[in-house]
Image (tube, grey):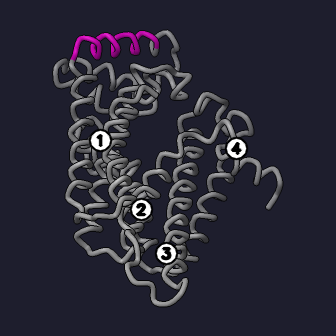
Amino acid sequence: MVPKLASAAEYFFKMGVEGKRFRPTVLLLMATALNGRLSEPLSDGVGDALTTELRTRQQCIAEITEMIHVASLLHDDILDDADTRRGIGSLNAVMGNNLAVLAGDCLLSRACVALASLKNTEHPSYFANQFKNIYFFHKCCLEYYMQKTYYKTASLMSNSCKAITLLAGQTSEVAMLAFEYGKNLGLAFQLIDDVLVFTGTSTSLGKGSLSDIQHGIVTAPILFAMEEFPQLRAVVDQGFEKSPNVDILICLEMQALEYLGKSRGIQRTRELAMKHANLAAAAIDSLPESDDEYVRKSRRALSDLTQIVITRNK
C-alpha cells in the first residue's frame, strides 16, 4: 500500500486519537456472554483449541465492525465539511478530501477481505444493511429520523451482535435477542449523540450546534421542538436552502436554538434514548440462564453499558 494512504487509513487508530472502541468492546463482551465453556473437551487440548478458534473469529467480527465504523466517519466528515473529529483535526482537513475518501475506501476494502476470510455466506448480508439509505419519508418526520438512525448507527451494531451469536452456534432466538440488544443500544447511543450536539461542545463532537440543519439533517431534539413550536419548521426550511449570507445563517441558528430551549426537545430525546436503553437491557436479561461466572459478568457489563450510553457527556 502507498505509505501516505496507509498513514491516512490508520489515522483514527493511532494512540491518542483512537476513540472509545465502544463497538469492539460491546462485541467482545457479547462473545463472552454467549460462548460459555466446552463441558467435555473432545480430547486433550481440543476443546481449548476450538474455543480459541471461535474467539479469534469473533474478534475478527469486532475488527471488521470498527473498520466499517471508522470508514463511515471519514466519509461523513467529508460530506459535513468537518474541521475536527474526536478533538483533533479531521482527516479531510489535515490531508485533504481526496486522500480521506481513499482512506475510507481502503478500510472498507480491508473489512470486506476480512469478512470473506470467515467463509460464511450469511455475514456479508448482515453488514450490507450499514450501506442502505432511505428516501420514502419526509426529512422532518420522526419515523424517517429513526429509520435513518437505524441504518446509520444501529444496524452495524445489531448485525454485528447477531454475527457474533451465530458464530457461537446459538439458536435463532438467542441471535434475535443479541440483534435487539445491538439495535436498541445503537439507537440510544445516537439519540444521546444528537442531544450532545446541542448540550456539548463543538470540540468534543467536531461540529457546531446547527451544522446538521445546514446540511439538511434534522435530528430528534429539533423534531420534538417542532411539535411544540410549528413555526420552527420555517426556520429549518430556510437552513436547508444553505443561504450564502453568513448573517442570515447566524440569525437562523439563534432562532432555532431559542425555540429548542423553550421546548422539551432535549428532554424528550433523552427519554426516548432511555426507552431504547431499557429495551437493550431487557434483551440481555432474556438470554438463557448460565452458571458460568464469565458469562454472567459479561452480561452484567452489557447491561451496565446501556446506562453508561445514556448518561455520558461526550
Dot 3, crowdedness within 10 Å: few (<14), some or many (≥20)?
Answer: some
View extreme (left): residue: 228
Task: Residue under label 1, please give it.
Answer: 145
**Discs 1, 2 touching: Cβ within 8 Å:** no
Verify whether residue 187 appears in magenta: no
Mark seen at residue 14: 4
Q: Kindly report the distance in space between the C-alpha atoms of the residues bearing marks 3 and 4.
A: 30 Å
Q: Kindly report the distance in space between the C-alpha atoms of the residues bearing marks 3 and 1.
A: 41 Å
Residue at x-position 40% and y-position 24% = 239
Q: Which residues are magenta?
A: 250-263
**Discs 3, 1 touching: Cβ within 8 Å:** no
Check disc 4 and give the amino acid type.
Answer: Lys
Task: Residue under label 2, please give it.
Answer: 32
Residue at x-position 42% and y-position 62% = 32
Mark seen at residue 51: 3
Screen quadrant of the N terminus = bottom right
Check disc 2 and give the amino acid type.
Answer: Thr
Dot 1, crowdedness within 10 Å: few (<14), some or many (≥20)?
Answer: some
**Discs 4, 2 touching: Cβ within 8 Å:** no
* 1 or 2: tag closer to the N-terminus: 2
Q: Position of residue 244 (x, y in %)?
A: 52, 20
**Discs 4, 1 touching: Cβ within 8 Å:** no
Dot 2, crowdedness within 10 Å: few (<14), some or many (≥20)?
Answer: many
* 4 or 2: tag closer to the N-terminus: 4
Instruction: Give the SS element for disc 2.
Output: helix
Q: Is residue 298 left or right of residue 43?
A: left
Q: Is residue 283 left or right of residue 89?
A: left
Verify whether residue 254 appears in magenta: yes
Q: Main secondary structure of the magenta part?
A: helix
Q: Position of residue 238 (x, y in %)?
A: 37, 22
Instruction: Give the SS element for disc 3.
Output: helix
